[in-house]
Image (cartoon, rainbow, N blue to C red):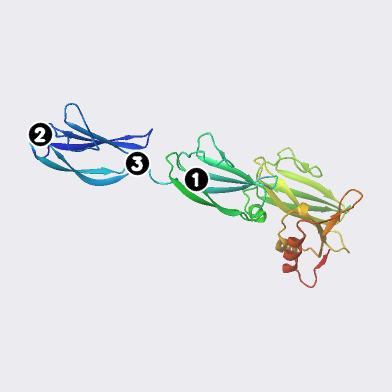
Amino acid sequence: MEDFAKVNYEYKEETNTVVATINSIVELQSTKKSWSLSENKKQYTYEFNSNTTYTTTVTDIMGRTKNVVIKIDQIDDKPPQIDMEYVLNNDNTIKVIMHSDEILEDTKPSWNLSENKLDYVKIYTFDNQEYATPVQDIWGNEVWIKIKMKTKSYYYENAQGPNLTVKYIYDSNDIVTAYIISDRKLTDSKPSWNLDESQTIYKKVFTSNNSYLTDVIDEQGNKVYVSVIINFFKNTYLGIDVSEFQKFINWSSVKNSGIDFAFIRVGYRGWGTAGTLVKDRFFETNIIEATKVRNRYWFLFL
């Protein structure tokens, strides 16, 4: 009769608790005040809401005792695992997504929780934001997540956009035709260029030297910037005119592409009678980064 009592466990998913039942082949004495003894006095039950391991003693009606090991390890007491994703939108906002490996409690009013309650989403309109915020699963298990966004240039440089090739055809009539060739179908978002029927080739005719950065968007909305450099026409210097509208520029690529000079906008005068002077938002970035790669044959005009 040494093994007159054994333990069974039942995990209750709806409450994240475990009911432990000590089953005996003989009647038991009511010696365990925190446990419930059945009417036939052969079962002790207790509902646990946290994991634990310990030894408890039961006594049968003949006074025999048995030490029973209670081991509760099924309760979810671990915080959710969160994977971070950062996406640069076409309007230059940053979508931050927290992907969870388990259902989350909707405890973050400034974030949008998905229908399946596995993803938090929030849109940011500025860069270099860094802070920590708590995330809880439905059982209250909490983990602190660091939100750390990089600069917009990082997202542009790492965008999963189409692979592009630029080719040029020069004919005897002093006309250059530029082709932007993509490995994916493109959105017709460039009114000054002609997109062919396959939606993979942009074409534009140039009659003078011209160099600038332009963007191409594929059907999934991924945006990639590409340099168009027309330097076939002689007796001219090649230059670009940049401002906040070009956003972030890879100045090393500009220099290596044969550009001789750059006009960098400092600012502009606003509308109205006041004519307020407004500083170009990208002036400081452009002048600092352009100066880093400039040599004595390359000129900057402000």
Residue closer to the observer: 161 or 23: 23
Q: CA distance from mark 3 to mark 2?
A: 33 Å
- Amino acid carrying mark 2 in the image: Ile
The disc placed on residue 160 is: none
Res. 58 in view: yes
Category of crowding for the residue at label 3, using alpha-carbon neighbours closer than 10 angstroms: few (below 14), some (14–19), many (at least 20): some
Q: Which residue is mark 3?
A: 75
The x, y position of residue 14, in whole percent, is 38, 32
Category of crowding for the residue at label 2, using alpha-carbon neighbours closer than 10 angstroms: few (below 14), some (14–19), many (at least 20): few
Residue at the spot x=72%, y=47% of the render? Answer: 216
Name the quarter where the N terminus is drawn. Answer: top left
Residue closer to the observer: 90 or 172: 90
Q: Which residue is mark 2?
A: 61
Local secondary structure at mark 3: loop
- Amino acid carrying mark 1 in the image: Val
Q: Which residue is mark 1?
A: 135
Local secondary structure at mark 2: loop
Q: State yes or no: discs 3 and 1 in contact (Cβ < 8 Å).
A: no
In front: label 2 or label 1: 2
Q: CA distance from mark 3 to mark 1?
A: 19 Å
The x, y position of residue 263, in whole percent, is 83, 61
Within the image, what quadrant is residue 290 found in? bottom right
Q: CA distance from mark 2 to mark 1?
A: 51 Å
